[in-house]
Image (tube, helix red, strand yellow):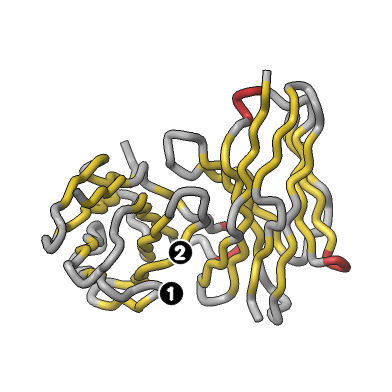
Amino acid sequence: DGGITQSPKYLFRKEGQNVTLSCEQNLNHDAMYWYRQDPGQGLRLIYYSQIVNDFQKGDIAEGYSVSREKKESFPLTVTSAQKNPTAFYLCATMPHDRGLMNTEAFFGQGTRLTVV
Amino acid sequence: AQKVTQAQTEISVVEKEDVTLDCVYETRDTTYYLFWYKQPPSGELVFLIRRNSFDEQNEISGRYSWNFQKSTSSFNFTITASQVVDSAVYFCALILPGYQLIWGAGTKLIIKP
């Protein structure tokens, strides 16, 4: 089935450890996004990538890193520099080949990260 | 400024009541698109509707309807005869040329039986 797979669904991290969240898509979409969502809050953009080997910082990139070596994959690393990483992380994709008028964002099921 | 405002943080109604979720946007662009997404408790966002800046026709889909008014920069969402399954967080979003996405803060809708 076509879609976006985020793994793991739940992740526990000890303070001071780096951790990588996976986002894989087989939709052949160009753009990929990482969002952070805190309880009762909206979506805040961490990083996004429009093409392979290129990505841009979003509003809250500090303490996070990404790579886009393949079109299908956009992993997010939460580093020890991120002081308050406990949150729900959502990966999204968006096709560009339909044109702006027919596009939409598609979302994975999210990863809930808890620092213990 | 490019911005989407959902002023209602949380709305609580009794089942079968009608409810309207407000969305007000700001943009300098003349071409843009507006979306509504639903986020159920499971967490994944589900696309509901897209509307472009040149089409002010209202849309109805079953119990859902959307009212787009450029004069007031609003794109409001109404659920008629609400059901418990409609309980979720609803997000309004704006997409601009360059595929820039601007999200509202979301409105948590609670439908009580």
Q: Residue at x 63, y 23 (%)?
A: B84
The chain to which mark 2 is attached is A
Label annotation for residue A59: 1
Residue A75, position in %: x, y? 22, 60
Measure the C-alpha gap from mark 2 to mark 1.
7 Å
Q: Quadrant of residue B1?
A: bottom right
> In which quadrant will I find the N terminus of chain A?
top left
Q: Which residue is mark 2?
A: A44
Q: Position of residue A47 (x, y in %)?
A: 35, 70
| Residue B39 versus residue B83 in the image, above or below | below
Query: Is A58 situated left or right of B112 in this image?
Result: left
Check disc 1 and give the amino acid type: Asp
Q: Are marks 2 and 1 on the same chain?
A: yes
Task: Find residue A19 and report its image quarter.
Answer: bottom left
Query: In the image, is B53 to the left or to the right of B103?
Result: right
| Picture coordinates of residue B88, whole percent (x, y) | 57, 37
